Amino acid sequence: MRKFDGKRLVIATHNAGKLREISALLAPYGVECLSAGQLGLPEPDETGTTFAQNALLKAHAAAKAAQLPALADDSGLSVTALGGRPGVYTADWAERQWFEGDPGRDWYMAMGKVEGLLSEQGPDVDRSCWFSCTLAIAWPEGDEVVYEGRVEGTFSWPPRGTMGFGYDPVFVPNGRDVTFAQLPPEEKQSMSHRADAFVKLVADQFSTAAPVDGLSG
């Protein structure tokens, strides 16, 4: 398995929230994180049917375009009562139609779609859910490696909190009574699906370096 031995890593995302989280997790290792958005790289079509396929698509596209190692994250929310949906299509559920020339993603709309489908099943519906995260590192030469993480929780309504992004305001991790969006970023990072995947990445890629705070063990 190839090891990351450089100092600059392209984070294959245009999502500022993901960039902040990943940069914070890699900061103890002296890695300079550059986002695909900062480099003006296009976003490839996510045509995969799994988180791993989409993460690899993004990582390889960024690595090839930037001629640097690239790390991509593909993550999503799966709801038990919805048969695992939205899953790999998590971001698609937030896509809004063109309106006065302003396309983009509306996460409140996406959360509302999930709540609407759950409400249709009655007040006793199973609200258990989980976040999945796949991290893929790709090199310009074509090498690749994948790490997967997961965190279990409950879908809560209405949304609460302002410190997260995506579906964070409706996700209550098991053992807590607040949503991801109500937790300080460093606390969320210590227990999230992304943190779980990073534990595995760190063990493989940075095993000789000091552990990331909150991710050791």
Image (cartoon, rainbow, N blue to C red):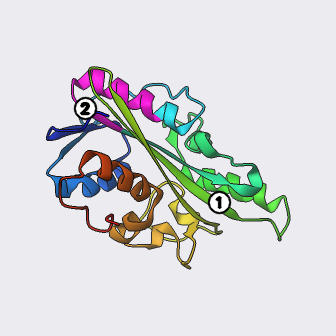
Of the numbered discs 2 and 1, the one sitting upstream in the chain is 2
| Quadrant of the drawing holding the C terminus | bottom left
* Residue 48 at x, y percent in the picture: 56, 28
- Residue at 30% x, 54% y: name it: 20
CB under 8 Å between discs 2 and 1: no
Placement of 150 over or under 33, stated as above or below: below
* Residue type highlighted by circle 1: Cys
Label 1: few (<14), some or many (≥20) within 10 Å?
Answer: many
* Residue 35 at x, y percent in the picture: 27, 39
Q: Determine if residue 64 is in view.
A: yes
Total tally of numbered discs in the picture: 2
- Residue at 57% x, 72% y: name it: 174
Residue range highlighted in magenta? 55-71
Q: Identify the residue position indicated by label 2 in the image.
A: 69
**Side of 171 where 119 appears, left or right:** right
In the rendered image, residue 39 lying in the magenta stretch gets the answer no
Q: For numbered disc 1, what is the local secondary structure?
A: strand
